């Protein structure tokens, strides 16, 4: 299986200029810097991978439109990227998706198709077949991984002597790209993934060296709703090659980190995005550390609970 | 009275590199970009002016330390800048300053002196005399104004065709610097100040062309506690020279803007920092607009009220 390369990521960085924010590193304390991907358009790093994937399509393929199935940040990112390219996007969401998320997707000009959860993938495949559109997967694709990897390029450019980069892990697209970039440019820097204990499948998989599947119902227990997916063969290969460790944090630590980020860093970060700060607060690494805050889309009621 | 020049501001920009964050512009909607100074160390633009003022002192003068009287963002900024230079800072605060603000100042290594409100200025003058320290005023000083002006430099560098820049107005240091920079680099860009209706003294002063004083008790009515100061002769001269207009917003509009920024821009912004978005939402300007969000230090209870 071919892994994404540093050249793929550098090319992605050129493509996404103007579409994604060049997020700054924000000093949290003497040892920790924050990379606030919550400030991206659509509120998450996902815009990097989605935009890169669309940019890589040929013009006539792209003109036939793109399809994604997701109710989360990836859906918004694909809708947003399609709007920037002026091409149609169809987002297939489960029928119980909150109205606010449907409206956010509609606001980017995408078409939203609501189907029973179990039919999402099939309906997306139908749309691809019917319209000649292209499916943009949330993480299991080299162009998506390369786009997410631009986060790692920026971290090393801004802080070349960083000792540890902490990255949230779900399907593994973000950490695959970040670890590829970081290890190419700064091999001594440690790349450490962070998962909720309640969805610690990637941590277990990396420990035993083979992809361990957890039941979706188990992974669904965590408040970190962006971290309930599981790695693919492709992302797991990247993790085995480049990730030093994956650690886990408790639900309580995640909630506490959301509150700390609001009060001390003045950032609205979703639970999934705050797991890296949670890991740092629980067990600070020696040397300069960067915590990637992957997104900021959190229901106001959930957020207020942690203030 | 000598006004600050674009060269002063450009020199300040070189000095503050590494001490202040080069904040990105964040796209809010088709017409509006946000300049999130809430992401600065200490959570406000004030670090720019304070650091520039300390950098301009000779080394032996700076070594004798600095003094500020403030319980707000300026105090934190002076304490933070002094820590970066490794020189002592004394912050004189009113005796009823909330413990959390005193602790924040102490956390930057500053000495905190608590006195009755009416004695702040006198006690600060005593400390200056006793220790040979230098008073760093919150806005009434060319070096402070030049430091704040770097916000304007960055806006024009990132968005050269901006039609309007909205800036919160209190003592006027920020808008004086920003307007000086913007008018020098892009004379066609409008610079518009924003005040709370309940502290609209600068708006009234600019309208009548002379500095009108409002009683402090009147200015204290607004929830925007960072906008209760009044302009000095120096800042008012800058406003008369370079500011196109000052508009006012209601308390309700301010609170609504704090909530919108949390939900849609994933930023924790204090009421004083949110007045510019409030003005935009009430009366959008034609053309591309930048709203400067001056700070993010808000009590969690106050913030939660607007979510």
Image (cartoon, coloured by chain):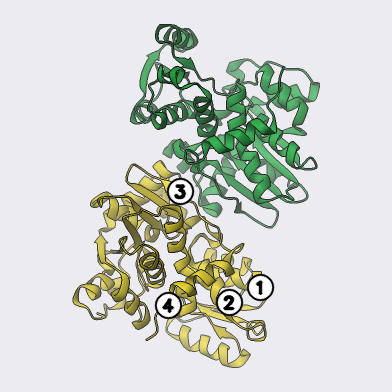
Chain colours: A yellow, B green
- Could you confirm whether marks 3 and 2 are on the same chain? yes
N-term mark: 4 or 3: 4
- Could you confirm whether marks 1 and 2 are on the same chain? yes
Query: Is residue B196 in view from this perspective?
Result: no
SS under mark 3: loop
* Direction from residue B267 to residue A207 in the image, left or right: left
C-alpha span from label 3 to label 2: 29 Å
C-alpha span from label 4 to label 1: 24 Å
Which mark is on residue A267?
3
Camera-nearest label, 4 or 1: 4
Which mark is on residue A85?
1
SS under mark 4: loop
Provide the chain ID for the residue under circle 1: A
* Direction from residue B169 to residue A272 in the image, left or right: left
Camera-nearest label, 4 or 3: 4
Camera-nearest label, 3 or 1: 1
Which mark is on residue A4?
4
Instruction: Residue B41: give x, y in percent of width and height.
Output: 45, 39
Q: Callout 2: 10 Å neighbours few (<14), some, many (20+)? A: many
B225 or A2: which is nearer to us?
A2
C-alpha span from label 4 to label 2: 17 Å
B110 or A242: which is nearer to us?
A242
């Amino acid at each position: 299986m071919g892994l994404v390369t540093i050249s793929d990521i550098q090319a992605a960085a050129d493509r996404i200029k103007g579409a994604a924010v060049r997020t700054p590193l924000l000093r949290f304390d003497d040892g920790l810097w924050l990379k606030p991907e919550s400030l991206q358009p659509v509120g998450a790093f996902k815009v990097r991978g989605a935009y890169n994937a669309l940019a890589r399509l040929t013009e006539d393929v792209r003109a036939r439109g793109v399809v994604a199935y997701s109710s989360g940040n990836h859906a918004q990112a694909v809708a947003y990227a399609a709007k920037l390219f002026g091409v149609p996007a169809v987002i297939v969401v489960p029928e119980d998706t909150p109205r606010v998320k449907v409206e956010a997707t509609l606001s980017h000009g995408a078409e939203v198709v609501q189907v029973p959860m179990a039919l999402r993938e099939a309906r997306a495949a139908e749309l691809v077949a019917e319209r000649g559109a292209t499916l943009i997967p949330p993480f299991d694709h080299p162009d998506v991984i390369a786009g997410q990897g631009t986060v790692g390029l920026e971290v090393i450019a801004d802080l070349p002597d960083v000792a540890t980069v902490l990255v949230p892990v779900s399907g593994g697209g973000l950490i695959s790209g970040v670890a590829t970039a970081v290890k190419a440019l700064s091999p001594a820097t440690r790349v450490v993934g962070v998962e909720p204990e309640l969805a610690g499948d990637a941590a277990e998989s990396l420990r035993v060296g083979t992809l361990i599947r957890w039941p979706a119902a188990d992974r669904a227990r965590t408040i970190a709703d962006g971290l309930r997916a599981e790695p693919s063969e492709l992302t797991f290969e990247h993790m085995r090659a480049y990730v030093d460790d994956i650690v886990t944090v408790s639900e309580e630590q995640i909630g506490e980190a959301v509150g700390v980020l609001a009060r001390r860093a003045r950032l609205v970060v979703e639970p999934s995005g705050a797991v890296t700060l949670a890991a740092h607060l629980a067990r600070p690494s020696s040397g300069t550390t960067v915590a990637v805050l992957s997104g900021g889309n959190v229901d106001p009621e959930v957020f207020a609970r942690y203030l």
